[in-house]
Image (cartoon, rainbow, N blue to C red):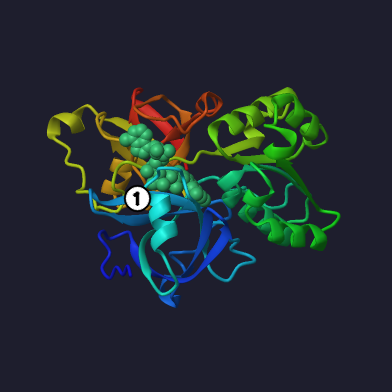
């Protein structure tokens, strides 16, 4: 029995697991009870994720992100869905050890894989466990929006389809608005870019969201490129494991007089308010915003989760690790605040 009572940092909280649902042979959902006093902190947007602290005898703990498969509009409680990764530590630990009534240390919802408006028409692609943020967007768009939703959902075989029953019921409830296309590798083989492009042609004007293994997402990107969908309407969520500890509080950055003298300046817009900050060249954007007490969105601080993605409107930054961003994202001005250091003397950035 695992119980955690005291959070390790000031940003995390301890939540009780209210239910564990066996979804498929290798996938389980974990539903959390959120007490009233934490409701605001745990309010989330469709497509966002939670970060869980998983105990480890070797390292004390590991941190793993899991997308919320629930919708804030249709589900009473937040739910993440964990698929066992072969030889993976965290996913197997969660599937083997977590039961209703136990507690887990959790960081509040984060992430930018979320539609700006739910009133669009959506073309969604999910593969395997990549269905989790996608189904949250799907359910939210169907209840809150008025557009059409097309889901292309790829799996190894019928038995590995997560949420099959829920999707069947939704397709029945929204016969004119929801189309679900199941793609089974056991039946059709792996989808090719040409096959997905042929499927996507009628939906070229839709807003696309995709999540799944790297090769699947490469294929979808290629397909959407072929049908001429502009990059600005294509959104992708990359699943990977964190290596650092986002639960630990970090000491505020210390800035020497020398560093302060050679600082750039940045006008950064957060929640519609513009802040003018001095930006010492060795500090990251997240560091300087935290030092000013701003509520900057961030989680892993390793450039791996994408929570701190923002847009450079003027000026230039350099980044150490930005693998979660596609070259097209970077071209469009997207940066990761936790990795960005200033190159030019003046910058404008928008969250
Ligand atoms: C934003 C976000 C959302 C996510 N949402 C979900 C979700 O909804 N559902 C879900 O199931 N997953 C999700 N993930 C992925 C999840 O966070 C984990 O990455 C996943 O569960 C695997 O973690 P693990 O600890 O089991 O595997 P790990 O222990 O991290 O191992 C992963 C793989 O790396 C290999 N490996 C491990 N250590 C080494 C090493 N030293 N050298 C070489 N290879 C190694 C393992 O063999 C394994 O194949 C998400 C990730 C992100 C960033």
Which residue is depicted at the point 73% across and 47% down? 120
Residue 280: image quadrant is top left
Looking at the image, which is closer to me, 175 or 163? 163
Q: Is mark 1 within 8 Å of ligand 1?
A: no
| Depicted 316 relative to depicted 256: above or below | above
Which residue is depicted at the point 80% across and 63% down? 173
Element at badge 1? Answer: strand
From the image, which quarter does the N terminus lie in? Answer: bottom left
Looking at the image, which is closer to me, 283 or 199? 199
> Could you tell me if residue 178 is visible in this image?
yes
Which residue is depicted at the point 40% across and 43% down? 87
Q: Position of residue 94 (x, y in %)?
A: 41, 57
Judged from the image, the quadrant occupied by ligand 1 is: top left
> Could you tell me if residue 303 is visible in this image?
no
Which residue is tagged 1? 63
Q: Position of residue 271 (x, y in %)?
A: 48, 51
Q: Position of residue 122 (x, y in %)?
A: 72, 45
Residue farthest to the right, as pictured: 176
| Depicted 83 relative to depicted 338: above or below | below
Residue 192: image quadrant is top right
Q: Residues within 10 Å of mark 1 (few under 14, many from 20)?
A: many
Residue 181: image quadrant is top right
**Horizontal side, residue 271 vs residue 279: left or right:** right
Q: Position of residue 347 (x, y in %)?
A: 40, 30
Q: How many marks?
A: 1
**Horizontal side, residue 206 vs residue 128: left or right:** right
**Horizontal side, residue 312 vs residue 320: left or right:** right
């Amino acid at each position: 029995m695992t119980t955690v009572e005291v959070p390790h940092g000031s940003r995390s909280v301890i939540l009780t697991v209210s239910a564990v649902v066996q979804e498929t042979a290798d996938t389980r959902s974990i539903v959390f009870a959120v007490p009233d006093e934490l409701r605001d902190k745990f309010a989330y947007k469709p497509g966002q994720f939670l970060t869980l602290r998983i105990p480890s005898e070797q390292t004390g703990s590991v941190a793993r992100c899991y997308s919320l498969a629930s919708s804030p509009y249709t589900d009473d409680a937040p739910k993440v869905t964990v698929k066992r990764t072969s030889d993976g530590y965290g996913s197997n630990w969660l599937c083997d050890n977590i039961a209703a009534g136990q507690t887990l240390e959790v960081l509040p919802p984060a992430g930018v894989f979320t539609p700006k408006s739910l009133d669009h028409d959506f073309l969604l692609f999910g593969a395997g466990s990549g269905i989790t943020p996608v189904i949250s967007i799907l359910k939210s768009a169907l209840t809150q929006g008025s557009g059409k939703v097309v889901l292309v959902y790829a799996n190894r075989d019928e038995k590995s389809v997560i949420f099959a029953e829920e999707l069947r019921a939704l397709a029945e409830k929204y016969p004119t608005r929801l189309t679900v296309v199941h793609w089974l590798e056991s039946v059709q083989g792996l989808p090719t870019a040409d096959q997905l492009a042929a499927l996507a042609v009628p939906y070229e004007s839709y807003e696309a969201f995709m999540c799944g293994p790297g090769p699947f997402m490469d294929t979808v990107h290629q397909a959407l490129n072929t049908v001429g969908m502009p990059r600005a309407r294509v959104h992708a969520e990359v699943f990977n494991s964190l290596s650092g500890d986002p639960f630990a509080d970090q000491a505020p950055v210390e800035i020497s007089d020398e560093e302060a003298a050679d600082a750039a300046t940045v006008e950064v817009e957060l929640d519609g308010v513009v802040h003018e900050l001095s930006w010492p060249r060795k500090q990251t954007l997240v560091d300087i915003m935290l030092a000013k007490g701003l509520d900057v969105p961030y989680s892993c601080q390793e450039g791996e989760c994408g929570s701190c993605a923002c847009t450079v409107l003027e000026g230039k930054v350099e980044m150490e690790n930005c693998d979660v961003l596609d070259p097209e994202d970077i071209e469009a001005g997207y940066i990761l605040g936790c990795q960005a250091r200033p190159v030019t003397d003046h910058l404008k950035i928008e969250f």
